[in-house]
Image (cartoon, rainbow, N blue to C red):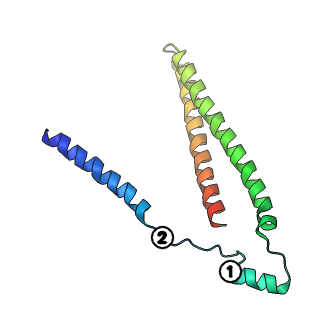
Amino acid sequence: MPRSLTRRVARVASLTALLIAPLAAFAQDIPRPFGNDSLVGTLANSAGYETSERDATFFAEALGSVTFALLSFTGLLFTILILYGGYRWMLARGNESEIDKAKSIIRSAIIGLIVTLASYSVWLTITYFI
């Protein structure tokens, strides 16, 4: 085996080990700050407030479903725009103004896709911690 191939295999194995190693850490689950077992939940129950999980999370679940659908649709839309820009570029046949229009469509679609993915990651972070 050549030395450069051995180094590549070692690098890939090391990177794989680094990426898989955190999966073996069985960390304790973080309790939700406003659940029924928390201090806030206990105080709310003793004060006579209803703290059932279903009533408290129904609106959040519905909003999450709508948000997921909208983000999925916009991601699909920007992916279609990227394909459309590539199609226009192929049909430009060397015409610089048509190529510039196609590049503009692709650039705008990539920026929109990045914004959509960023908002999706923020949404996932918020729904995980709330």
Q: CA distance from mark 1 to mark 2?
A: 20 Å
Which secondary structure lies at badge 2?
loop
* Earlier sequence position, callout 1 versus callout 2: 2
Residue 112: image location, x then y, percent? 61, 41
Quarter-of-image position of residue 6 = top left
State the residue position of label 1: 38
- Front residue of this view, candidates 60 and 100: 60
Q: For the point 72% across and 82% down, which residue is it?
A: 40
Residue 96: image location, x then y, percent? 51, 19
- Front residue of this view, candidates 106 and 35: 35
Residue 1: image location, x then y, percent? 14, 38
Rendered view: 22 above or below 11: below
Residue 95: image location, x then y, percent? 52, 15
Residue 26 has which mark? none
Q: For the point 59% across and 35% down, which residue is it?
A: 109
The amino acid pointed to by label 1 is Ser
Rendered view: 78 above or below 8: above
Which residue in the rendered view is the most extreme toward the left? 2
- Front residue of this view, candidates 93 and 95: 93
State the residue position of label 2: 27
Which secondary structure lies at badge 1?
loop
